[in-house]
Amino acid sequence: MVGARKSLPLRVEVAARAGDSRVLQGVSPALRRTRIEVVKRQIDRTDICRKDGIDLVRPILAWMDFAVEASKTEVRFAFLEACRLGLVGRREVRECFEMIGGRRGARKIRPLLALWVPELGRIRSVLEGLILLALVERRLPMPRVNTKVGGYEVDFYWPDHGVVLEADGQAFHRGHVQRGIDAAKTRDLEARRLVVLRVTYKEFDQSPNAVLDGVTETLAFRAVSTENGSIGK
């Protein structure tokens, strides 16, 4: 959920259903700085999944443990990555709500669970997830997420308003070639009488309210124009 490390971790937590809690230190040159903390946990067999021959707790439980010491930003990032990877759905959100009462880290988790919508399962990037959470928090009309419009896949689409919002993340929208593709896509969508808004990660990170104000105003204007019959579908 939070990306691969380039180096060995300095701390690893292992849950055990029997025995005493203890702390172990790596003995090989590569692991001698790594601290392994074995903690006693009551873990149901249904909470365990197996990956690459290793027993792991289910992702939603790992996320709850992660939230204890991680920052709000890290917890939110991990939550959105879990949604993007299809690891968090309605069942996991309901279970998490039932389990977090009184737990450390609950204050970081609860607001994210309250904003969860099924459309988070369709995001392709954390930026899209951040924008979608902000749209839900503002109670704006829910867009279609990563859907086809005129032969193009767009990030967010409000068909009743004729509005498209593209989230230009750093990983996929760099370089002259990609910018040319984005420009051609925008021209084609505008030729279909759609309003196309674009936002970069930097713009949203620095001024999320300004971005949301722009989306809100555009949706409101297009809603009035549609009612007056001045916008074609």
Image (cartoon, grey):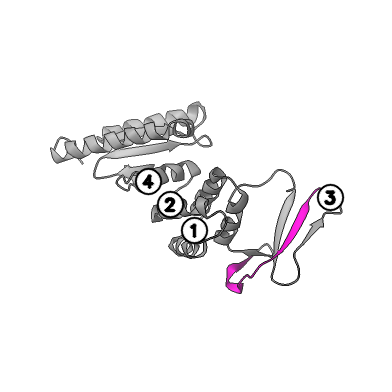
Nearer the camera: disc 3 or disc 2 = 3
The extreme left residue here reads 228
Compare marks 4 and 3 and give the one earlier in the sequence: 3
Name the residue rendered at 39%, 54% in the picture. 117
Q: Please indicate whether residue 37 sits to the left or right of residue 92 in the image.
A: right
Element class at badge 2:
helix
Compare marks 1 and 2 and give the one earlier in the sequence: 1
Taking 121 as reference, is 156 above or below it? above
Compare marks 3 and 2 and give the one earlier in the sequence: 3
Cβ–Cβ under 8 Å for marks 1 and 2: yes
Give the numbered dot on residue 120.
2
Compare marks 4 and 1 and give the one earlier in the sequence: 1
User: Disc 3 residue type?
Assistant: Arg
Crowding near pointer 1: few (<14 within 10 Å), some, many (20+)?
many
Nearer the camera: disc 4 or disc 2 = 4
Compare marks 1 and 3 and give the one earlier in the sequence: 3
Q: Is residue 65 visible?
A: yes
Give the residue number, with chain letter if any, for mark 3: 32
Q: Please indicate whether residue 180 sits to the left or right of residue 51 in the image.
A: left
Element class at badge 3:
loop
Compare marks 4 and 2 and give the one earlier in the sequence: 2
Cβ–Cβ under 8 Å for marks 4 and 1: no
- Magenta span of residues: 33-50
Q: Position of residue 125 (x, y in %)?
A: 49, 44
Give the numbered dot on residue 88.
1
Between the C-alphas of marks 4 and 1, the distance is: 19 Å
User: Disc 4 residue type?
Assistant: Glu
| 43 within the magenta span | yes
Element class at badge 1:
loop
User: Disc 1 residue type?
Assistant: Val
Crowding near pointer 4: few (<14 within 10 Å), some, many (20+)?
few
Give the numbered dot on residue 137.
4
